Image (tube, grey):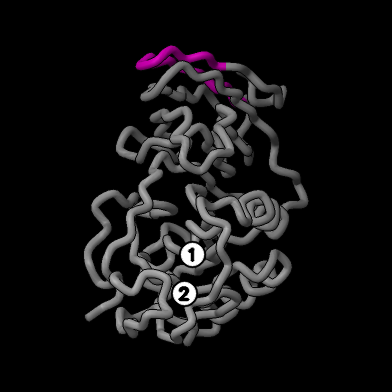
Amino acid sequence: MEASDLSSRTLRLAAGQTSTFTLRQATAGDLALTVDCRPSSNPDDPGPVFKLSAGDLGTSPSDPPRAGYWSRTGAVTAGSHVMTFTNLAGPATCTIRAAAVPTAATCRSSFSFRSPNTNHTHFKVGSDTSGDWESFPVSGNHWGAWAKWSSVYPKAIKRGFLLHNLEHGGLVFSYKCADNSSAACKAAQDKLVAIAQGIGPRVLVTADPTQPEMFAIRGWRYGYSSSCLDETSAKQFAQAHYRQGREDADADPPVPYDPSTTNVPCEDLMAAPDSCAR
């Protein structure tokens, strides 16, 4: 595939098959690469699952499997770049696209993916549910309580709560800081708030010092991150994955609490009182 022709190619993989695909870049430049296996819209369907390895394109065999969707925007050097696909599930037909990043774009790097993790069991608040999580989890087992919608949290929401919000179709916008006390972190928070407010009420904005890049957006089973913030692609991602969780429930927890701690009051009004801290 010649990246310069900005065309699409189709890759058909049998179950368990490994195949390679060569991207030839005539000159160095910023490129948007997308692998789209048209995964099901059913949030409980793992869909096509593949491993992708292309070290000079920002991915390696140690990366988690992707469930039918992977996209990376960033610098690509001149020359040939080999992408190796290993199909971990049933037969898959995937489209591989390459497109030049517009010259006028001020943010020229981003990454997005779909996770194969469909787990959603509720556990007691404070218990360790991280056994099935990826390093940047967007789904998986979590706690029975969740954070209040339409809120901005200056400290990191515990992931056991955050994932429950995603399961309910919400979006979590986050920035790579411990809190919003510095000018840079406050500016990052404000940029995400401006985008989140235009999406709908089922949104959260929070610090997250453990995420891979400065800016991130999560929906159930889908993740987006970037070292900068491209407003156009961030909005497109948010609009595509808003209210796409397993449960279309937007109720706030009726008992107020701080989701940056595990101090959750146990009341019968909670949706899952057996999951609260004792």
Q: Residue at x 24, y 52 (%)?
A: 131
The answer to whether any part of residue 225 appears in the image is no
Q: Quadrant of the N terminus?
A: top right
Q: Position of residue 109 (x, y in %)?
A: 58, 50
In the rendered image, residue 264 lying in the magenta stretch gets the answer no
Q: Residue at x 51, y 51 (%)?
A: 246
Secondary structure of the residue carrying tag 2 is loop
Q: Residue at x 46, y 22 (%)?
A: 82
Q: Is residue 199 left or right of residue 74?
A: right
- Compared with 66, 254 (above or below) is below
The answer to whether any part of residue 61 appears in the image is yes
- Compared with 254, 85 (above or below) is above
Bin the neighbour count of mark 1 within 10 Å (Cα to Cα): few under 14, some 14-19, many 20 and up: many
**Real-space Cα separation, disc 2 to disc 1, in angstroms:** 7 Å
Three-letter residue code for mark 2:
Ala
Magenta range is 11-25
Q: Residue at x 63, y 38 (%)?
A: 32
Q: Nearer the viewer, residue 192 or 261?
A: 261
Q: Which residue is mark 2?
A: 147
Q: Main secondary structure of the magenta part?
A: strand
- Based on the displayed image, in which of its 4 quarters is residue 156 positioned? bottom left
Residue 257's mark? none
Secondary structure of the residue carrying tag 1 is helix
Q: Is residue 264 left or right of residue 57?
A: left
In the rendered image, residue 18 lying in the magenta stretch gets the answer yes
Q: Which residue is mark 1?
A: 165
Q: Position of residue 114 (x, y in %)?
A: 49, 42
Whether residues under marks 2 and 1 lie with C-beta atoms below 8 angstroms apart, the answer is yes
Three-letter residue code for mark 1:
Asn
Q: Nearer the viewer, residue 15 or 144?
A: 144
